[in-house]
Image: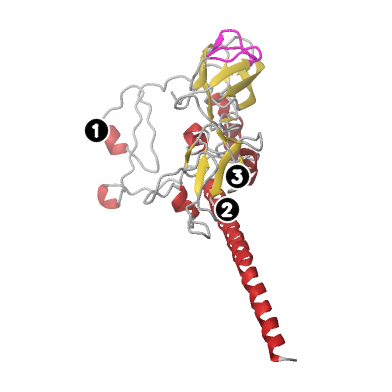
Amino acid sequence: MPIILMIMIFTAMISVGVLLIGPMTKRGKTVDTQKTVDGAISSIISWSIANNRIPDATLPPSVTGFASVAGNTRDAYGNPLVYIYDSNLTSPATGGICGRQSTNLRVSTVTDNIAFVVISAGEDGIINSTPNTSQAYGGTVAVSPNDLVKWITLEELKNKAGCYGTTQGRLKILNNELPKMCTGSSYTAKVYAEGGAPFTGTQYQWCTQGTLPTGITATPGTVCPAWSANASNVQLTGTAPSTPNTYPITFMVRDNDTNTAQKTLPINVVSCGPPAQPAPPGAQISFFNNIDSFASSKPASANTVRIDATAKRPLDGYTRGWPEPVAMPDVVKKLVTERWGEYWATDKSG
């Protein structure tokens, strides 16, 4: 093959190689940038699940900001990533992740509730989407086709966080039961809620369904489907009726993000028997010891309970054997367990 022809072929190959290097380099940086954005999103999701909130845009040394959580926040071209988010999701006090069902953030290409957006400028180094800086935002992000833009919806984030199970942060009523009422006796009980997005502090809106026992009122006493003014709990007070009965009452609660929860709690009115009588004058109780000498020198007065827990030896004038430790019979344990709610028929929590 003539040398001149070989030189021409070699030159052509070099030219083709040069022409390919540019697109291949650009493609490589695009792929690397996509990986960087995906990595940042994965880090945000993992951190958010662990904290029931998404990071904000505060800069280091803050550990709750995007820069600290995401780690690498520059794309393959060296440009900083932009992080745009809904501020309602940055605090459990405003619902966190599991406590909300809507956001104020949208993107121009979809109508979903958006939790956060991550944007890379790409090769030109200019963010053409709006807004173009990291910030909390309560509007629609205008997405530019010139940028690499990825987002996570609230629904996606809640599914990844397991918000539809028993995850902490969901709005729920705390009580599993109400104390029993003793017929004809005064009664006080409270129903509490937690999670979700409270209106202020620990306040929610409440309503009830069902007929309360005669003589008992609920505060707030709004009947569903209407909702009460903001309140920390529902308080039941009054005097129980004279006839035993069971009253199933459904309590419903709503938060500031329109999440709702409900629970039906039966109110059991029972006959508790005669009230306990006071101990007779001079009554005494001795635990594991004798109080003979103390009792002889200090005559007991009415309703006295004396406990002597000091060690006694022959040098102290005590020569009798020690009594066996007091043990509750199984039949008594069973009776106490079965009637525990009656013993505590009145709310003692204050």
Query: Is residue 184 shown above or below 323?
Result: above
Q: Secondary structure at mark 1?
A: helix
Query: Is residue 280 shown above or below 48?
Result: above
Q: Position of residue 266 (x, y in %)?
A: 64, 22
Secondary structure predominantly adopted by residues drawn in magenta: loop
Query: Is residue 172 shown above or below 240?
Result: below
Q: Nearer the viewer, mark 1 or mark 2?
A: 2
Q: Is residue 216 magenta?
A: yes
The residue under the point 57% across, 31% down is 171
Report the residue marked by disc 1. Answer: 297
In the image: residue 283, left or right of residue 90? left
In the image: residue 24, left or right of residue 298? right
How many marks are shown on the rendered structure? 3
Residue 112 visible at all: yes
- Which one is earlier in the sequence, the residue at label 1 or at label 2? 2
Quarter of the figure with the N terminus: bottom right
Q: Position of residue 350 (x, y in %)?
A: 43, 23
Q: Are marks 3 and 1 in contact (CB under 8 Å)?
A: no
The residue under the point 56% across, 8% down is 215
Q: From mark 3 to mark 1, how far is it between C-alphas?
A: 83 Å
Report the residue marked by disc 2. Answer: 42
Along the line of sight, the residue nearer the viewer: 191 or 301: 191
Mark sitting on residue 27: none
Q: Secondary structure at mark 2?
A: helix
Q: Position of residue 47 (x, y in %)?
A: 52, 50
Along the line of sight, the residue nearer the viewer: 101 or 172: 101
Q: From mark 3 to mark 2, how far is it between C-alphas?
A: 11 Å
Report the residue marked by disc 3. Answer: 151
- Which one is earlier in the sequence, the residue at label 3 or at label 2? 2
Q: From mark 1 to mark 2, how far is it between C-alphas?
A: 77 Å
Q: Which residues are magenta?
A: 209-228
In the image: residue 278, left or right of residue 217? left
